[in-house]
Image (spheres, rainbow, N blue to C red):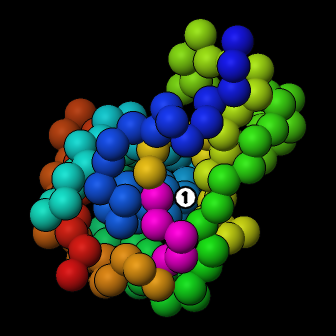
Amino acid sequence: MEPILNEAKKLYNEPMHTCEHILNQTLVRMFGCGRSVNAHIERKKSKCDYLLNEAPTEAQIVEITQKVNEVIDAHLLVFEELMSREEAAKIADLSKLPADASETLRVIRVGDYDACACIGQHVDNTSELGRFEIISHDFENGRWRVRFKLV
């Protein structure tokens, strides 16, 4: 099977999709959870769902916003690397990888902050994102849904 290359990229809004990567890694680091289980990424606003034991506190929500914006403000390079599944598994969670994915994977790196097998489109540098803001959030049956935008 051929490697996943640029031609196969999903058509997402590049800044919001890149921000989703940063948000995912921030939640993984803060709560020890997995990456989002469901996401809807659009230019004006987006949402992600995370499986958590309890709702984040208001202080944690402020901290999430601060951490995501710190990564954005670090002006990290966003780039792709092609690597084997075995190599990718050492730096990224491959549990959501489709069964028919090739042996060579396209891994997107946000500096040294995040690495994720992905076919979406991304910006070249986090400086292109703007400011991250959480619009709203709710918690129900172990699912925390967060809605966000870039301004």
Q: Which residue is mark 1?
A: 25
**How far across and how far down the image is residue 132, in percent?**
31, 77
State the residue in front, 54 or 39. 39
Residue at point 49% right, 77% down?
126
Query: Is residue 49 in view from this perspective?
Result: no
Q: Position of residue 113 (x, y in %)?
A: 65, 67
Horizontal side, residue 86 vs residue 141: left or right: right
- Horizontally, is 33 left or right of 135 in the view? right
Q: Nearer the viewer, residue 53 or 15?
A: 15
Residue 74 visible to the viewer: yes
- Please tell me whether residue 17 is drawn above or below residue 72 in the rendered image: above
Q: Quadrant of residue 20?
A: bottom left
Give x and y (percent) for residue 5: 61, 36
Range covered by the magenta-colored residues: 122-126
Residue 111 spot, x, y in % from top left: 67, 71
Determine if the magenta segment contains residue 123: yes
Residue occupying image coordinates x 23% and y 43%? 40
Kindly report the secondary structure that dominates the magenta region of the rendered protein: loop
Mark 1 neighbour class, 10 Å CA radius: few under 14, some 14 to 19, many 20 or more: many
Q: Quadrant of residue 58?
A: bottom left
Q: Quadrant of the C terminus?
A: bottom left
In this view, which residue lies farthest toward the front? 7
- Looking at the image, residue 140 sits to the left or right of residue 9; the answer is left
Q: Amino acid at mark 1?
A: Gln
* Placement of 26 over or under 10, stated as above or below: below
Kindly identify the residue that appears in the image at 57 percent across and 88 percent down: 74
